[in-house]
Structure formats: C-alpha cells, structure tokens
C-alpha cells in the first residue's frame, strides 16, 4: 500500500488515501498499482447509462463509433451519495481523504464532493477530508494526480502535498485542437454556424483552459498540420524543464499523437512523453480527432 503517515490535531497518526475521478484519463492499471480510489462520471447513450470505470465500463472506441453513427451522448457528474460512500469508507478505515478533482469551472462534481464532506463532518466531526480543485480536465487533471502520487511516495504529508499542487496547478498548460467542430457546437462551445463554416474551410479551433478552469477558444488555424505545429510551439514556449514530462491526450487514431510525441522528444527539456486516449467523459464533448498537449510552464497561465 502506498500510504503516508500524517498527524492530526490531536496528535493521532493517520494515513491518507488519494481519491480522484475518471476525467483524469488515468488507466485502470495505473490507478490500481498506485493505490488510488477512482470515482466515475457516467455517460448516457441512447437512453442507456454507462459507467466510465470498472470491468463493464464504456470505452472511448465504442462511444466514438456511436457518435459517428449520429448518437448524442450526455455526461452526468458524480453525485453526493457516491462521494459520501467513498469518503466514509476511507475515514472508517482510519485514513484521511485527499480528493483531487475535476475543474469546478467545467462540472458540478467538485461541489458534490464538498457537500458530501459537510454531511460526513456532521456525522463524524473528526474526519479529515481535503478537497483540491485542479481547475483542470482530462490528462491535465491526470498530470496533477501523477505529481501528487510522486509527492505522496516521497513521504509528503497532505498539507505539504497540497501546498506543492497549489504552486504547480496554475502553471499547468492545456493546449487542445478539436477536429470535429459539430460536437463543440452541440456542447455550446462554438455556434452551429461557426461549426458549419469552419468545417467547410478546414478551420481548427485552438482551445486552452483559463485560470478559472474553463475552456476558452484562443485561436483558429486553417489546416490540421498548422494547428498541431502551433500546439507544439505553445507547449515549448516557456516550458519548465524541472517538469520534463509531457502528456498527450487523443481521441481516435493514435498515429497523430505518435508523430507529435516524436517531435516533442527532439526538443530540449522534454524527456518523457506519455500518450493517453481521451476517456469517454471528455470524448463526449470533443468527438474524434482531438489532440491535447499538457505540460508545466514556468509562469502561471493567464
């Protein structure tokens, strides 16, 4: 078990468990091997609600296939009851909870976690539950969970770990190119007219995550190749080589992600590039052909 001892206000030694959610796009093998508890958002497809974790979870490949056939999936946040059940089980085992969550700017999931904490504290006033808002999504959120695991395994307390995340998270950069504009339009990210015109003239929107953890369109590039080159340029500009790992999230074929990985590894400072398929929760809103690059910059994002 990868647990770290910490001491509460009464001087009682406790361990803590990292809890996160399925929007991190972390693999089940990573979650299991690093002693993390993961809660799953759900996706409803043709009146059937699918889990995004577990043995019978919805896969991105199946989802994208259905979307290509015209399906319009809908995601649902983790509810208060789910959080309450997990938080209570951890506390009853004598551990603290550290929940590292999906951006409050994109989902009500974090608010559900806070409500669950309040309810549990009424029942168990000594429970220790820390909630950290990553203001990130997809493999960006996953990047911060990976950093948290490293810090935990170095023996950091919850307080020290959260202090480190507070310093790192505002410098997390998320550069996204969406290939399928109609799914962005369906989610209200761009207008239907812009999606139609953009598709006709091969326009690719460039999206990032702002300091409040919300998606914003920061540019439009004609042609996929130029858009990808811009993402690479933005990633390397002000790149912090103290964090030499880059994560690439993709939907659909991994070929484009592999080529971007090769280019990034040729640049100074980048030592490792991890490729991660975008999970169904995120793919629901982006469709196929999306590519996102996540890294840590030297400066806070603005």
Image (cartoon, helix red, strand yellow):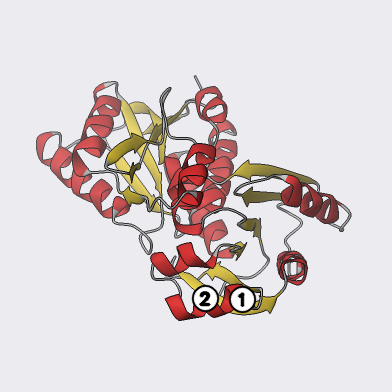
Residue furthest front as drawn: 69
Q: Is residue 232 above or below residue 67?
A: below
Q: CA distance from mark 2 to mark 1?
A: 6 Å
Q: Secondary structure at mark 2?
A: helix
Relative side of 173 to 75, left or right: right
Labelled disc at residue 122: none
Q: Are marks 2 and 1 in contact (CB under 8 Å)?
A: yes
Identify the image quadrant of residue 291. Answer: bottom right
Q: Position of residue 182 (x, y in %)?
A: 48, 66
Q: Quadrant of the C terminus?
A: bottom right
Instruction: Name which residue lies at 30% across and 51% down.
Output: 109
Helix, strand or loop at label 1? It is helix
Residue 200 is labelled as 1
Visible residue check, residue 270: no
State the residue at coordinates (81%, 51%). 259
Q: Which mark is residue 196?
A: 2
Work out whether residue 146 can be spotted. yes
List x then y, in percent, for residue 169: 53, 58
Q: Quadrant of residue 93?
A: top left
The front one of 88 and 179 is 179
> In which image quadrant can residue 229 be found?
bottom right
Residue count near mark 1 (Cα–Cα under 10 Å), binned few <14, some 14–19, many ≥20: few
Percent of width and height locating residue 62: 49, 37
Question: Which of the pair 267/300 is nearer the observer?
Answer: 267
Q: Residue at x 60, y 57 (%)?
A: 290
């Amino acid at each position: 078990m990868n647990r770290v001892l910490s001491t509460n206000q009464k001087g009682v030694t406790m361990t803590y468990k990292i809890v996160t959610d399925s929007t991190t796009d972390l693999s089940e093998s990573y979650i299991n091997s690093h002693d993390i508890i993961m809660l799953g958002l759900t996706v409803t497809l043709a009146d059937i609600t699918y889990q995004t974790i577990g043995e019978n979870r919805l896969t991105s490949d199946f989802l994208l296939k259905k979307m290509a056939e015209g399906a319009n999936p809908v995601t649902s946040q983790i509810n208060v009851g789910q959080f309450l059940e997990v938080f209570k089980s951890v506390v009853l085992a004598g551990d603290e909870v550290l929940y590292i969550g999906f951006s409050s700017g994109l989902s009500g999931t974090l608010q559900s976690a806070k409500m669950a904490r309040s309810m549990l504290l009424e029942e168990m006033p000594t429970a220790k539950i820390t909630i950290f808002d990553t203001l990130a999504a997809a493999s960006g959120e996953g990047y911060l969970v990976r950093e948290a695991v490293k810090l935990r395994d170095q023996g950091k307390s919850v307080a020290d770990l959260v202090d480190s995340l507070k310093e790192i998270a505002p410098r997390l950069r998320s550069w996204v190119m969406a290939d399928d504009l109609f799914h962005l339009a369906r989610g209200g990210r761009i207008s239907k007219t812009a999606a139609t015109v953009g598709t006709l003239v091969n326009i690719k929107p460039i999206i990032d995550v702002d300091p409040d953890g919300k998606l914003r369109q920061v540019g439009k590039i004609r042609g996929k190749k130029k858009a990808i080159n811009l993402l690479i340029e933005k990633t390397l500009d002000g790149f912090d080589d103290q964090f030499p790992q880059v994560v690439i999230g993709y939907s659909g074929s991994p070929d484009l992600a592999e080529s971007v990985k090769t280019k990034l590894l040729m640049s100074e400072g980048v030592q490792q590039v991890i490729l991660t398929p975008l999970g169904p929760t995120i793919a629901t809103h982006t469709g196929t052909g999306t590519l996102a690059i996540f890294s840590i910059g030297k400066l806070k994002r603005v």
